[in-house]
Amino acid sequence: MRRFWGRYLLVLLFVGAGLLHFLYPAPYLRIMPPALPAPRLLVLLSGVAEVAGGLGLLWPATRRWAAWGLLALLVAVFPANVHMLQLHEQLHLPAWALWARLPLQPLLMWWVWRARR
């Protein structure tokens, strides 16, 4: 039963975060590493991937593919998290909070990995 609720919480987390990419893209655009092309398109695509991956966790037929996609997405967005740490003063965010956020990425990946079953 705990896995059931954990999966639904993960679905809400990814779908909610993905929708924020469309509703409030500015914060995501600010943390996009400058070397990446088409930042707005990448923000929107990552939002689509989060929503699709989150919803894909709901059904057994799509769960495994959704989990692999979300794992790939989490790896792909990690540079933006590091870049956000480098910009913490410009973003008016405490560095300690952004440092604390970095180890959460592997934990989130573990959670996605467990949700695939």
Image (cartoon, rainbow, N blue to C red):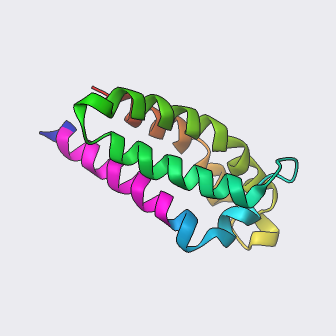
**Is 7 inside the magenta-drawn segment?**
yes
Q: Which quadrant of the view contains residue 77?
A: top right
The residue at the point 62 percent across, 45 percent down is 102
| 78 left or right, relative to 103 | right
> Can residue 115 be spotted in the picture?
no
Camera-side residue: 93 or 84?
84
> Can residue 21 be spotted in the picture?
yes
Tally the numbered discs.
Answer: 0
Q: Eyeballing the image, is 109 above or below 87?
A: above
The residue at the point 63 percent across, 69 percent down is 25
Camera-side residue: 45 or 93?
45
Quadrant where the C terminus sits is top left
Residue 44 locus on image (x, y percent): 61, 58
Quadrant where the N terminus sits is top left
The residue at the point 48 percent across, 59 percent down is 17
Report the magenta residues as a range.
4-19
Magenta: main secondary structure: helix
| 59 left or right, relative to 42 | left
Q: Residue furthest left?
A: 1
Q: Eyeballing the image, is 34 above or below 73?
A: below
Residue 18 locus on image (x, y percent): 49, 58
**Is 5 inside the magenta-drawn segment?**
yes
Residue 71 locus on image (x, y percent): 51, 33
Camera-side residue: 56 or 110?
56
Camera-side residue: 105 or 67?
67
| 96 left or right, relative to 91 | left
Q: Which quadrant of the view contains residue 41?
A: bottom right
Residue 107 locus on image (x, y percent): 47, 37
